[in-house]
Image (cartoon, rainbow, N blue to C red):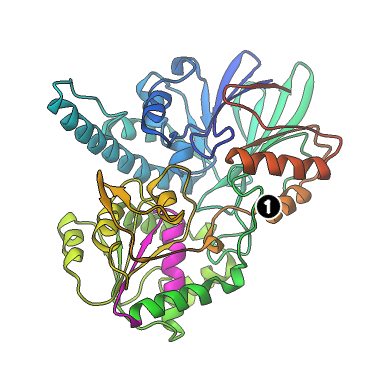
């Protein structure tokens, strides 16, 4: 088997891997690359292979950096099945439609600027119709149910504990008289999550492809996360300020809503208005409620015996643009949760533009921000920052909490690998910025001295 590493190599976005064996081609992931605009456009529009030649796609989970370019793949001629868990299919259906709208809006914005220079318009990467066409090719499979994908490949999804429906992908392969097991970690959760189950250990692994988003970093303890959120939010509200939380629509929004719910029930936060201002976040939360099979025992019991963990009287979910715009006129303390988590798109940019200049406000990041994104610039202390092409002074308090991260840190990744059984012969370290990936590779060399460990470059290949 030959593996082509075509994305998320020494970076965290654009997951894309092509497997070749038994005369067939399988695609693992098909994510959007996010970074510098020119490079992103080029890499997302043009695949380094013919989509018509791909026999099937296997998808670990619904985050856009893993599934976001599937509509473009189908638009360019891929007609096979896209295999994933049921929850991933449902989340991807709303996320890809939302992504198509962002593509449309971005193309319109760029085209307007180009028109002023007498240049022709640009086309969006894909449309809502392309997203709908892709979703029709999705095939949902439960966890722990082996299924054949192509000749010689059987796949089993194991819970990854990262977001709803996220899976580790276990490949059981027959090739030229050989049988072996190849494990793709997907994105691994931290374990002991408020909502999701812990990552499942996988047995008898011969080859491993593992993420390294936080391969060199430790998160702050989860036990202190709620107290830290409560303190920072409470202090801001007492100053009559607003709390602006850039948050990923899937996973992080539900986590922070649940945390605010628990703090409110405990009397540690006043019942100020809380707004989730993102149509995608609203839809994603509804999908979460439809898939309690992914919940851990504690939240499943809370859902059955008490109340909706993602709802309370002072919480409002906003879909309509007009209602979102009215938030600009809020004078009283409030909490606004809005997408995207990296502040690169969506309504969060409007809320940042309107509130980042007021020193009584708090901008609270609760997730990862890739290099060069607006979120990363704000978190690094850059001042001013450009929002919608205009400079904005950063006077609000800026804070970040990585204890809410959906990604395992270096110690949790180490424990994840330690729990895998089998004589692992080769390990490929992916989905991490270069420093994180290289550091985790060194950790693995100490753990697995007999394994060949690589940190693939873009378009590098690995023979199994």
Q: How many marks?
A: 1
| Residue 319 quadrant | bottom left
Q: Is residue 283 above or below residue 228?
A: above
Q: Position of residue 225 (x, y in %)?
A: 54, 70
Residue 242 is inside the magenta segment: yes
Q: Which image quarter is the N terminus in?
A: top right
**Which residue lies at the image location 63% right of the left edge and 44% below the top edge?**
436
The magenta stretch is 238-260
Q: Is residue 147 above or below residue 174?
A: below
**Which residue lies at the image location 46% right of the left edge and 84% below the top edge?**
266
**Which residue lies at the image location 17% right of the left edge and 61% below the top edge?**
323
Q: Position of residue 224 (x, y in %)?
A: 58, 73
Looking at the image, residue 443 sits to the left or right of residue 317; the answer is right
Residue placed farthest to the bottom in the image? 267
| Residue 442 quadrant | top right
For numbered disc 1, what is the local secondary structure? helix
Q: Position of residue 5 (x, y in %)?
A: 59, 26
Q: Is residue 354 above or below residue 414?
A: below
Q: Nearer the viewer, residue 280 or 303?
A: 280
Looking at the image, residue 108 sits to the left or right of residue 419; the answer is left
Residue 211 in view of the camera: no
Residue placed farthest to the top in the image? 23
Residue 30 in view of the camera: yes
| Residue 100 quadrant | top left
Residue placed farthest to the right in the image? 450
- Badge 1 is on which residue? 410
């Amino acid at each position: 088997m030959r593996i082509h590493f075509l994305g998320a190599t020494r970076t965290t976005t654009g997951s894309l891997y092509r497997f070749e064996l038994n005369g067939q081609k399988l695609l693992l992931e098909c994510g959007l690359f996010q970074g510098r605009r020119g490079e992103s456009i080029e890499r997302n529009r043009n695949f380094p292979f013919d989509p018509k030649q791909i026999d099937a796609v296997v998808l670990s989970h619904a985050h856009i950096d893993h599934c976001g370019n599937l509509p473009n793949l189908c638009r360019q001629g891929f007609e096979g099945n896209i295999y994933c868990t049921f929850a991933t299919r449902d989340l991807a259906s709303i996320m890809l439609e939302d992504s198509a709208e962002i593509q449309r809006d971005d193309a319109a914005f760029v085209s307007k600027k180009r028109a002023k220079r007498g240049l022709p318009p640009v086309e969006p990467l894909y449309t809502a119709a392309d997203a709908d066409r892709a979703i029709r090719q999705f095939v949902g499979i439960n966890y722990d149910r082996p299924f054949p994908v192509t000749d010689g490949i059987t796949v089993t999804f194991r819970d990854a504990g990262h977001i709803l429906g996220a899976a580790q992908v276990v490949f059981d392969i027959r090739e030229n008289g050989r049988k072996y097991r190849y494990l793709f970690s997907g994105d691994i959760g931290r374990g002991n999550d408020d909502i999701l189950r812990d990552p499942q250990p996988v047995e008898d692994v011969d080859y491993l492809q593992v993420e390294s988003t936080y391969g060199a970093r430790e998160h702050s303890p989860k036990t202190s996360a709620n107290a830290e959120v409560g303190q920072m939010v409470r202090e801001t509200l007492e100053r009559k300020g607003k709390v602006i939380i850039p948050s990923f629509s899937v996973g992080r929004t539900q986590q922070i809503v649940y945390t605010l719910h628990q703090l409110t029930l405990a009397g540690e936060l006043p019942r100020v208005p809380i707004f989730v201002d993102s149509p995608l976040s609203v839809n994603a939360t509804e999908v979460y409620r439809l898939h309690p099979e992914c919940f851990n025992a504690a939240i499943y019991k809370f859902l059955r015996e008490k109340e909706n963990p993602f709802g309370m009287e002072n919480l409002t979910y906003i879909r309509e643009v007009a209602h979102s715009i009215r938030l600009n006129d809020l004078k009283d303390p409030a909490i606004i949760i809005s997408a995207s988590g990296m502040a690169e798109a969506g309504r969060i940019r409007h809320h940042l533009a309107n509130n980042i200049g007021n020193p009584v406000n708090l901008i609270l990041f609760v997730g990862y921000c890739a290099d060069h994104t607006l979120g990363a610039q704000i978190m690094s202390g850059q001042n001013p920052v450009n929002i919608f092409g205009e400079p904005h002074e950063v006077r609000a308090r800026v804070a970040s909490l990585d204890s809410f991260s959906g990604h395992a840190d270096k110690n949790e990744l180490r424990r994840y690998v330690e729990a895998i059984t089998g004589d692992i012969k080769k390990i490929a370290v992916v989905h991490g910025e270069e420093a994180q990936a290289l550091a985790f590779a060194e950790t693995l060399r100490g753990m697995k001295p007999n394994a060949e460990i690589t940190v693939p470059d873009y378009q590098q290949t690995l023979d199994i």
